[in-house]
Image (spheres, rainbow, N blue to C red):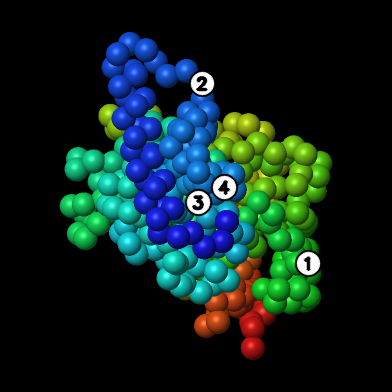
Amino acid sequence: MGERPEHAEALAADLRRRLGERRRADAASGDPPGGTLEQAVEELVGAEAAILPLERREELAELILRDAVGLGPLEELLADPAVEDVLVNGPHEVYVERRGRVERADVGFGSEQELRDAIERILAPLGRRVDELSPMADARLDDGSRVNVVIPPLAVDAPALSIRRFAGERPSAERLVELGTLTGETREILADAVSGRRSVLISGGTGSGKTTLLNALSAHIARSERVITIEDAAELRLRQPHVVRLETRPPSIEGRGEVTIRDLLRNALRMRPDRIVIGEVRGAEALDLLVALNTGHDGALSTVHANSPEDALRRLETLALMAGVGLPHDAVREQLARGIDLVAHMRRASGGQRVLEAIGEVVAVAGGVGVSELWRRT
């Protein structure tokens, strides 16, 4: 809608307050408001701002609805396909990430209460909330975007809100070559590994493009295979016809009902999968994954946070030991050597571009497991 004068925002806030008072008064009198919220907004704007041109009244109604049922000033940021992350450090401090670069956004909330109201509108449909007893929460928007919330007293200055967006269209491996993320050679190496049912682990830091690469490589899974995907937040968009998508569930307010990646992985093994794709290994499920890979469930794909291919194996080993079943280190390392075939390491370049840094083949070495380098970006 272009630039909005401050008085339009102020008028919208005033009318939104009066709308809320009117609907609460109607409900208290036993006369519930009729019609939809959109109709009520249109009637209010028509009565209180009749002198404004039609275009301005429509803009005013949109502003009222935006802050009444949406995410307020964040709506226009989330409507921008170039925005990858929205980072709110308080009502007047909002940042976005575009093309790998973080920059200050020219939007903000009118007050801390407005920010808290937006947070409440995100969490309420999911049956979750944040308060002093539970000041942190994770959630997911309808489009799959991941949301994290931290409020005082843990967030010292003001509520902090982070939204990690995921584009509706996932780039293919060919598109990643065009973008410079992959080379023609590395695309062929990884495509042959996936189609040949070799297990591939993708490592890298936060925001390095691990999930994007994982999704692109999944296109090389045969269409005849039954694929089970397991994720904390359903981000993957596989193109195969026979896909079952599983998603974890956080505990309720009472602390019950949690379903972890480990729970879903154990259940997936009973669902006759040809392939298992795990969005990210970050806990004791690493042991269950290694066991599965060593008992006939080859060709798995997953990601892990690590600084190099070698670190990825060490981290997977550490996570497997967190299962607490008393396995000796040598046994875990042997399962690593037999279960994981390739490690592809992603990094974010200084200009913000996400690139494949190296590909390594997992090999058994004296006293453990190592990585034999197949390719490295120069």
Q: Residue at x 55, y 82 (%)?
A: 351
Q: Which residue is mark 3?
A: 75
Q: Nearer the viewer, residue 58 or 77?
A: 58
Q: Nearer the viewer, mark 2 or mark 3?
A: 2
For the C terminus, which image quadrant? Answer: bottom right
- The residues tagged by marks 3 and 4 sit, at their Cα atoms, a distance apart of 24 Å
Instruction: State if disc 1 and disc 3 touch (CB < 8 Å).
Output: no
Quarter of the image for residue 198 reads bottom right
Residue 280 seen in the figure? no
Q: Which residue is mark 4?
A: 53
Element type at marker 1? Answer: helix
Q: Residue lying farthest top?
A: 30
Q: Which residue is mark 2?
A: 35
Q: Earlier in the sequence, mark 2 or mark 3?
A: 2
Q: Which residue is mark 1?
A: 174
Q: Position of residue 337 (x, y in %)?
A: 56, 62
Q: Nearer the viewer, mark 1 or mark 2?
A: 2
Instruction: State if disc 2 and disc 4 touch (CB < 8 Å).
Output: no
Q: Earlier in the sequence, mark 3 or mark 4?
A: 4
**Residue 291 in the image: above or below residue 174:** above
Quarter of the image for residue 92 reads bottom left
Element type at marker 3? Answer: helix
Q: Is residue 57 left or right of residue 129?
A: right
Q: Earlier in the sequence, mark 3 or mark 1?
A: 3
Instruction: State if disc 2 and disc 1 touch (CB < 8 Å).
Output: no
For the N terminus, which image quadrant? Answer: bottom right
